[in-house]
Image: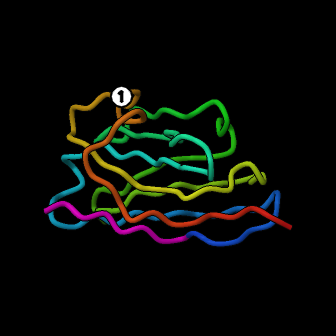
C-alpha cells in the first residue's frame, strides 16, 4: 500500500521560508506523479504545485508562482516543496498527494488518489 509521510511544517514569519518533504513508502516513487495541495479555514482545497513522475513537467498555482518550487528525488523516494517569500495568506494545512505515473500534472493538481496526513503551515509575525 502506498503511504505518504510529510514533514517540515510549522510556524514562520512573513517573508520566511519552509521546505516540506514527502517520503513515499510501499512502492517506488518512479511510478507516481506528486502534488502538493493546501486548504485554509473556510476555503476549498487548492492544488499548489504538481510534478510528473520523471520530474520533467511541473505546474504551479498562480498564487505561488515564483515563490514555491516543487522537486523530487526518486532515488530517495522523496518529493519536496520549497516555499519562499511566505505570506500570511499561505497559511493552511498542506497535503502531499500522489497519483499514477501517467497522470498529467494539471489533472494531478485537481484530484489525487493517494494522500498524506497533512501538516499545518502558519505564516504569522
What residue is at 26 percent from the left and 32 percent from the top? 103
Pointer 1 residue: 107
Please tell me whether the stretch drawn in magenta is mainly helix, strand or loop: strand
Seen from the viewer's position, the closer of residues 26 and 95 is 95
Name the residue at the right extreme: 125
The percent position of residue 82, horizontal first and vertical second, equals 58, 55
- Color encoding of the figure: rainbow
Q: Confirm whether the magenta stretch covers residue 81.
A: no
The percent position of residue 42, horizontal first and vertical second, equals 62, 47
* Residue range (magenta): 1-8
Is residue 63 depicted above or below 80 in this figure?
above
The percent position of residue 117, horizontal first and vertical second, equals 39, 65
The percent position of residue 91, horizontal first and vertical second, equals 68, 56
Q: Quadrant of the C terminus?
A: bottom right
What residue is at 46 percent from the left and 50 percent from the top? 71
Q: Is 76 on the left-hand or right-hand side of 27?
A: right
Label tally:
1
Neighbourhood count class around disc 1 (C-alpha, 10 Å): few under 14, some 14–19, many 20 upward = some
Dot 1 lies on which element? helix
Seen from the viewer's position, the closer of residues 95 and 69 is 95
What residue is at 70 percent from the left and 62 percent from the top? 17
Q: Quadrant of the N terminus?
A: bottom left
What residue is at 61 percent from the left and 56 percent from the top? 92
Amino acid at each position: 500500500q502506498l503511504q505518504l509521510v510529510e514533514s517540515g511544517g510549522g510556524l514562520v514569519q512573513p517573508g520566511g521560508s519552509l521546505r516540506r518533504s514527502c517520503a513515499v513508502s510501499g512502492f517506488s516513487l518512479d511510478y507516481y506523479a506528486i502534488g502538493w495541495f493546501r486548504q485554509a479555514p473556510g476555503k476549498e482545497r487548492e492544488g499548489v504545485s504538481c510534478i510528473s513522475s520523471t520530474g520533467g513537467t511541473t505546474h504551479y498555482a498562480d498564487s505561488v508562482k515564483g515563490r514555491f518550487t516543487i522537486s523530487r528525488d526518486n532515488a530517495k523516494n522523496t518529493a519536496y516543496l520549497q516555499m519562499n517569500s511566505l505570506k500570511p495568506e499561505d497559511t493552511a494545512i498542506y497535503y502531499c498527494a500522489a497519483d499514477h505515473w501517467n497522470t498529467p500534472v494539471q489533472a494531478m493538481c485537481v484530484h489525487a488518489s493517494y494522500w498524506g496526513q497533512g501538516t499545518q503551515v502558519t505564516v504569522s509575525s
